[in-house]
Image (cartoon, rainbow, N blue to C red):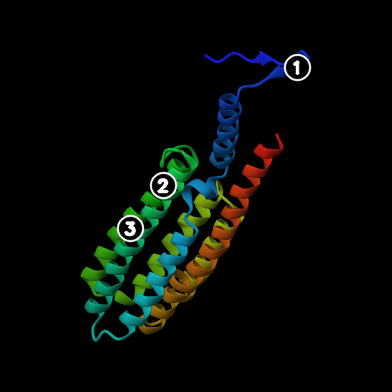
């Protein structure tokens, strides 16, 4: 244990190691309180959006509903992998466990939506009701974002409401139109929000560092 020492004038001098440790603690606590930094990917979210946009284009060129479903399921796996990798990277940079605090609560909300979506996808595919799949996916994803947004930033919750509106429109649309609604949500909207989140996270990180330097 390193004890504080005093300079010749009697003032307490805090060792450099103690000050560095205190700065690191403040940064970690600031980032941990920010649910968006530790759980919601910024640039990773934008990359997920690019995957969704590409899926919408590719799916529009398939000749059957079965092939259309294969394209979107493949895109979902790719996007989920990108999202998990981005969240892991953010957690490592913050020095926090991936599923600690807000991350764990957000993951619980999304796990329920994914489980429900998987079962409904299987049921609708078996009954041949492919046209309802875009509505189901958009509505469930929107519901998860709205629920997770209550413990995250307002931007995430707002994106959830946008997905709900797209899902409501998809309920009454044919599969061809629903495909482009999916592209608008999982593609364009995801890209825009991902960029905004990335810029916000960068500002939070800089602000935390500035506050420790001022201290």
Q: Quick check: 171 above or below 9?
A: below
Res. 11 mark: 1
Q: Quick check: 83 above or below 208?
A: below
If you read the primary sequence from the N terminus, does the residue marked by circle 2 or circle 1 appear first?
Answer: 1
Circle 1 Cα neighbour tier, 10 Å, few/some/many (<14 / 14–19 / ≥20)? few
Q: Residue furthest front?
A: 8
If you read the primary sequence from the N terminus, does the residue marked by circle 3 or circle 2 appear first?
Answer: 3
Q: Nearer the viewer, mark 1 or mark 3?
A: 1
Which residue does the numbered mark 3 point to in the structure image? 81
Q: Which element carries disc 1, helix, strand or loop?
A: loop
Q: Quick check: 31 above or below 168?
A: above
Residue at position x 32%, y 81% in the image: 58
- Name which quarter of the figure residue 64 lies in: bottom left
Front in this rendered view, residue 111 or 36? 36
Q: Is residue 192 toward the left or the right of residue 116 in the image?
A: right
User: Alpha-carbon distance for marks 2 and 1?
Assistant: 49 Å
Residue at position x 63%, y 15% in the image: 4
């Amino acid at each position: 244990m390193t004890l504080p020492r005093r300079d010749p004038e009697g003032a307490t001098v805090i060792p450099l190691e103690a000050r560095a440790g205190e700065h690191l603690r403040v940064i970690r606590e600031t980032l941990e309180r920010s649910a968006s930094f530790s759980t919601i990917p910024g640039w990773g979210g934008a990359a997920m959006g690019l995957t969704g946009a590409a899926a919408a284009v590719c799916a529009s060129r398939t000749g059957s509903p079965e092939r259309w479903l294969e394209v979107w399921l493949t895109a979902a796996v790719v996007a989920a992998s990108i999202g998990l990798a981005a969240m892991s990277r953010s957690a490592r940079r913050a020095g926090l466990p991936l599923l600690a605090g807000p991350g764990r609560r957000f993951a619980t909300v999304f796990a329920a939506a994914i489980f429900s979506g998987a079962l409904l996808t299987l049921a609708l595919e078996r009954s041949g009701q492919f046209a309802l799949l875009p509505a189901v996916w958009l509505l469930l994803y929107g519901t998860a974002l709205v629920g997770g947004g209550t413990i995250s930033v307002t931007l995430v919750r707002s994106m959830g409401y946008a997905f709900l509106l797209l899902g409501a429109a998809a309920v009454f649309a044919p599969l061809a139109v629903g495909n482009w609604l999916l592209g608008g949500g999982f593609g364009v909207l995801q890209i825009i929000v991902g960029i905004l989140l990335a810029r916000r996270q960068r500002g939070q990180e800089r602000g935390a560092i500035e506050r420790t330097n001022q201290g």
